Image (cartoon, helix red, strand yellow):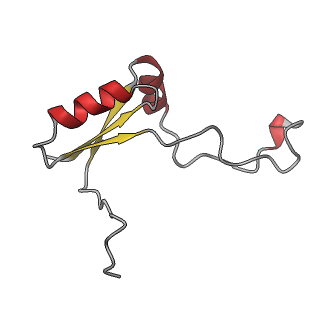
Amino acid sequence: MGQLLFVVSREAIKRYQDFKRAFSDQESVEIILDRRVGQRRRSAAGPSDPGSDRRHADRRARPDVDSDLSSLGYSVVRLTKPARFVSSSNTNR
């Protein structure tokens, strides 16, 4: 079985806390708050020319996740390989 990643909207703090509590004993479940804030890149010509975005495709685009976050306040992603969750205290490199 793969791991499950719950991405919870930043506006749904209570749901985030409820999920953290409910799945606290499940090692295969990770609950995170959505960290995205708007568009990360700007177009080369500036904001006045919306058709000149330098990106060809957003490699992180997940329309299903965006839709779920908007409508439900959370989204569940099944990870096929175990994710490497790296903590800031991990110094093995």
Q: Nearer the viewer, residue 49 or 22?
A: 22
Left or right, residue 48 beside residue 18: right
Up the image or down, 18 lies above or below 85; here it is: above
In front here: 2 or 84?
Answer: 84
Q: Quadrant of residue 72?
A: top left
- Residue at image location 59% in from the left, 46% down from the top: 58
> Residue 61 vs residue 88: left or right?
right
59 relative position to 71: left or right? right
Along the line of sight, the residue nearer the viewer: 57 or 15: 15
Residue 56 in picture, x, y percent from top left? 68, 48
Q: Percent x, y for residue 15? A: 31, 25
Vertical order, 53 against 85 (above or below):
above
**Residue occupying the far left of the picture:** 25
- For this orientation, the residue located farthest to the bottom is 93
Q: Residue sitting at 40 percent across and 23 percent down?
A: 73
Quadrant of image for the C terminus: bottom left
Give the tally of numbered discs. Answer: 0
Residue farthest to the top?
71
- The one nearer the camera, 80 or 17, is 17
Residue 75's x, y, as percent? 36, 30
Q: Residue at x 32, y 32 (%)?
A: 16
Q: Position of residue 50 (x, y in %)?
A: 82, 35
